[in-house]
Amino acid sequence: MITSVAASHAKGKFATDRIFGANAAANRAAAKYGKENVVNATIGVLLDNEEKLVCLPTVEKVYHSVPMTEVVNYAPIAGVPEYLEAAIDLTFFDQRPDAYIKAVATAGGSGAIHHVVWNYSEIGDTLLTADWYWAPYKVLCEDALRKLDTFPLFDADQNFNVQGFAAKVTDLLAKQNNLVVFMNMPAHNPTGYSLTDEEWAQALGVCKEQAKNQDKRIIVVVDAAYIDYAGEKNACRSFMKQFGGLPANILVIIASSLSKSYTLYGQRVGAMIGVTSSQEIAKEFEDINQYTSRATWSNINRGVMRMAAMIYQDKGLLAQVEAERNGYYKLIQERAGLFAREAQEVGLKMLPFKAGFFLSIPSQKSEAVCEKLYEENVFAVALPKGIRIAVCAVPTRKMAGMAAKIVKAKAAVGDE
């Protein structure tokens, strides 16, 4: 009996997303017990304190002013030129490195990651990220017939584990010539951690040491999806100056997205920005990634690219967007600060949080703890190494008392 007609590399694939599954469970509980009686800390979208999905008011206003001809027309494969200019300038602000810099439009940040995996690693290669990581990295690697490995993000003092990073980079480059490293910084998903400038210098130092072997090529991917919620815009980008003057066999690719920065999750607009000391590699970056765009989605949402360019070109509008976003940044920081204070009071260990949409709690029995929390109508996401709390989505009033409930749930399931 025939049960499959899929190609051999596609057989057995299926998607089970913990985040959307937990969110669905929270929504069912809200329908049964009332929304006010449920804490939904699962989904990575910005909700206000009334639990309404946020769209920045100026973004909404400009979006509705985009001419219909811009909304319905095809976009250039590489992206609308004015949008690409905006994407580069808004990525760096005053911290632009001394390098050749090119941009290609992508279907959100995920599109940038897809292109990196396909164009900068060989089939069968292993790519690298931290042991606390955004789960779709693994899906994107495995779907392209690659593997994903991890290095320990934190050392015993809860700082960046440069020794662990160096060991894994060295090990993988002994086995393969290309190494892609995903650094989901600043405002790391799922921990909220950000490397200091010194820690970035240490990580790049490891890469530069390996790059002395001209046969090796290292692609450092800065997944900057949450950068506009990471602090003052130039202070949180100061590490980017270090991307200038790198060896030609180190390419930095920054994955940017309008999903969080402009609260346009479903519009799927982002960019990949290549930073290199080589003019030839910059041109190659443009060429191969445009080619893969044509082979994957052809082109992306022209109307939203035009909207982003309109905001960028009007400094008054841009200032309004930044002010509105900063208000929500402060709200998220307030929520996370409340959780952190209560966690300290009840003896709950959490990973170091600096900024961003999420914070994380170490746990050896994360699934059991989350299931226990369900009994209290508290919904979080179980990760392999712990529990992720979406502080972006939990109103301040509901954040109060959550740490104590997690302590209680951990004790109930014997999670030390």
Image (tube, rainbow, N blue to C red):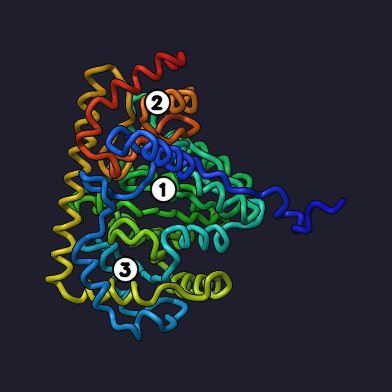
Residue drawn where x is 26% and y is 74% of the image: 64
Q: CA distance from mark 2 to mark 3?
A: 41 Å
Q: Tell whether 274 sits left or right of 55.
A: right
- Towards the viewer: 294 or 12: 12
Give the amino acid type for the residue marked by disc 3 in the picture: Ala
Instruction: Label 2: state its secondary structure.
Output: helix
Work out how far the residue at label 1 is from the one at label 2, CA to CA, in angstroms: 31 Å
Q: Nearer the viewer, residue 10 or 152?
A: 10
Residue 19: x and y, percent?
Answer: 45, 42
Can I make out residue 245 in this image?
Answer: no
Kindly identify the residue that appears in the image at 39 percent across and 33 percent down.
379
Between 197 and 235, the one nearer to me in the picture: 235
Q: Secondary structure at mark 3?
A: helix
Disc 1 residue type (three-letter): Met
Asked if 101 appears above or below 206 in the picture, the reply is below
Q: Which mark is residue 373?
A: 2
* Residue holding disc 3: 87
Seen in the image, is 386 located left or right of residue 64?
right
Task: Name the outermost residue toward the left.
Answer: 316
Nearer mark to the viewer, of 2 and 3? 2
Residue 171 percent location from the top left of the image: 57, 40
Name the image quarter holding residue 294. bottom right
Q: Earlier in the sequence, mark 2 or mark 3?
A: 3
What residue sits right under mark 1 in the picture?
Answer: 183
Q: Residues within 10 Å of mark 2 (few under 14, many from 20)?
A: many
Of tags 3 and 1, the one toward the viewer is 3
* Amino acid type, residue under disc 2 in the picture: Leu
Let me know if residue 296 appears in the view: yes
Which quadrant holds the C terminus?
Answer: top left
